[in-house]
Image (cartoon, helix red, strand yellow):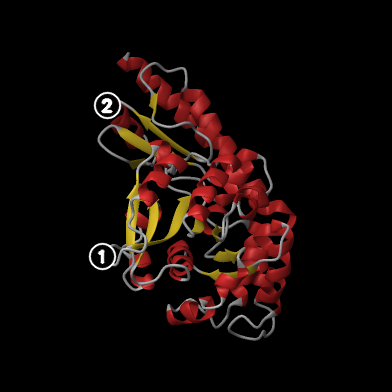
Amino acid sequence: MNFCSDNTTGVSPEIMAAIAAANCGAAMSYGDDEYTERLQVKFSDLFETSVTVFPVATGSAANALALATVTPTYGAVYCHAESHINVDECGAPEFFTGGAKLVTVTGDRAKIEAETLGKMLDRAGAGVVHRVQPAAVSITQATEAGTVYNPAEISQISEVVRSHNLYLHMDGARFANAVASLGCSPADITWRAGVDILSFGATKNGAMAAESVVFFNRELAETFPFRRKRSGHLFSKMRFLSAQLEAYITDDLWLKNAAHANNMAAKLAAGLAGVETVKFCHPVEANEIFMQLPESVIAAVLAEGFQFYRWDKSTVRLVTAFNTKEEDVNAFVEFCSGELSHNI
């Protein structure tokens, strides 16, 4: 009954089987294997355009190395104040860019708004030697609030980015959940909407340890192989990362997993929506729920054995995953509803 994070889950059986299959026999090292070579074609098919893809092991590496390819040491990356790169990556973007600055943008539901971003960039001091120079914008899909950017919102942000001659990066740690929520194609919320680089997540959605950096603007990928090697993310046995990613996107496993996680979150939210003392902080659009509960209820639910993170004194976050059990969701709703009814 662990709703702490989609990082607490195990590995999809299909992906575990792919790892075992890749363990048979020898394969060339450092990405010169058949699994990694196939990714270039399969990811290009997935996104309906030619892409260059690089497997890495962590989301932090994907984000930091991607941003380093488009941000000079004197540059700035504009991101939401609640973004993972700003709050949870221990300075990795600053480190791998060689000292670039993260400039935070406010916005409801952890989303950057194009108008706000445009005003900030207009007065950022581009070309002024005394000012850090805007280089890139990073958005998160799905966001840290569990909300989702639709294609129009991304396109509006992209127009602002292009008008200031910057690059647009997307942190897609929960990209699958966003695609499943929107019911669109992966292309619709990436390159068609103006995204240059995507950090494509898999670990939270059934992989053991596999992420990738997908370049839609392929010219930007020129220095990435060297940055990846220097950072320690050029795995000698790269086939084990690539085999995970290949299995992940085969037969729409990534979308099936994400759809289940999203559905479990929706079921949780629906079960508690009618309780008077429950206050949802954000719309439930993917697989994260933020809600405020009375302290006595939080204590009782934790004591019952349910696990989740406390975001602040009265706010909790629940995250569902590809293998969340419906009976656990029902048990949480039933117990929580009963405790809440005692507090009315």
Camera sees residue 7: no
Q: How many marks?
A: 2
Q: Residue at x 28, y 62 (%)?
A: 131
Mark 1 element type: loop
Q: Residue at x 31, y 70 (%)?
A: 99
Residue type, numbered disc 2: Ser
Q: Position of residue 106 (x, y in %)?
A: 35, 42
For disc 1, the neighbor class at 10 Å (few under 14, some 14 to 19, many from 20) is few
User: In the image shown, does 142 or 127 lie closer to the viewer?
Assistant: 127
- Badge number at residue 157: none
Residue under circle 1? 130
Q: Marks 1 and 2: CB-CB under 8 Å?
A: no
Whichever of labels 1 and 2 marks the residue nearer the N terminus, that label is 1
Residue under circle 2? 296
Instruction: Judge whether 333 appears above or below 324 on screen.
Output: above
Q: Position of residue 173 (x, y in %)?
A: 50, 54
